[in-house]
Amino acid sequence: MAMLSFSSDAKTNPQVAGYAGAVVTVLIWATWVLATRHTTATPLGTIDIGLIRYGVPAILLAPVWLRTGLLPKDVPLRLVIVMVAGAGALFFQVTAAALHVTPAAPGGILLGGSMPLATALIGIALFGERPDRMRLLGLAAIVAGVVILLAASMQKSGMTMTGFLLLPIGATLWAGFTHAFRRSGLSALQGAALIAVWSFLIHLGLAALYGTHLMDASLPDLALQVTSQGILSGLIATFAFGTAIRALGSSQAAAFTAITPVLATLGGAVFLGERFGVAEITAALVVGAGVALSTGVFSPKH
């Protein structure tokens, strides 16, 4: 029903659908960061979570990818590869490996905060995008807010070198996906289906090589991961973000991802008992202002 609603809105008011898709995405991602971090307390490894994350949407969206084919004839192979790597198997394995050894708050901050910056830089360097001064000011505000959050979080819970190395790589992969998807000509549903099925096949191969621990996990743990990873992150968030990219453009849609670390920090305070103070409030306000500016709402053309 949510998908049908997004599609209907996209026909009548694309920007409203785009903003809605972006908001839904960051809300789900904030939950995903906490859920992925939670797997450290379970027998589930990154391959197991990958099977769940992409297996559920691959099955549910089978009618879509069976119709388009695994390699849609009108989509260049390089775009398919960048999409699957950037939002699928490679992205997930890189970020999940980092989050397994990195506290949720700084991990979410570094990943979510790096995404809009990486997307903007790729757009400028490779596609000749020229953000106006308001958008540049917004990106600067996002960076400032992330630095505030990251500094405060590191003082409390620490940050691993693995996180410092892998999370920016994950953000760059996702940035590549946003640009590739926008140029693919695929719909949000087709993009989500293609990413899911290829990533599921890749994880089946990894499971055949390295084994799986799905049978060792409890039903509550499996239910949590099926809901958070498979249905919310793998299916709804991928579709919603594709809708945002189609309506708003790569850089503008990616700007919303900066809200994720703010929500993850708030979630850590509420659900994990982490401290919450002036630094978090300040960062939330700064990042919120940055997102508003980066989307172009206050740009001269508006």
Image (cartoon, rainbow, N blue to C red):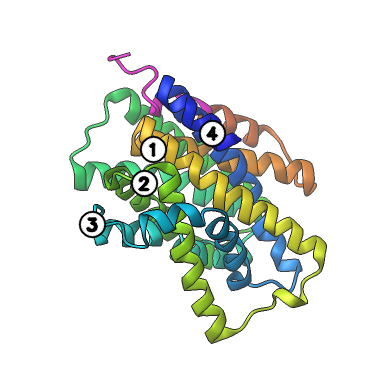
Mark 3 and mark 2 residues within 8 Å of each other at the beta carbon: no
| Among the two numbered marks 1 and 2 on one chain, the one whose residue lies closer to the N terminus | 2
On residue 178, which mark appears?
Answer: 2
Label 2: element kind: helix
Residue 28 highlighted magenta (yes or no): no
Answer left or right for 46 relative to 139: right
The residue under label 4 is 4
| Among the two numbered marks 2 and 4 on one chain, the one whose residue lies closer to the N terminus | 4
Foreground of the two, 151 or 10: 10
Q: What residue type is labelled 3?
A: Pro
Q: What residue type is labelled 1?
A: Ile
| Among the two numbered marks 3 and 2 on one chain, the one whose residue lies closer to the N terminus | 3
Q: Which amino acid does label 2 sit on?
A: Thr
On residue 273, which mark appears?
Answer: none
Spatial distance from mark 2 to mark 4, Cα to Cα?
Answer: 22 Å
The residue under label 1 is 245
Residue lying at 61% horizontally and 83% vertically, measured from the top left: 211
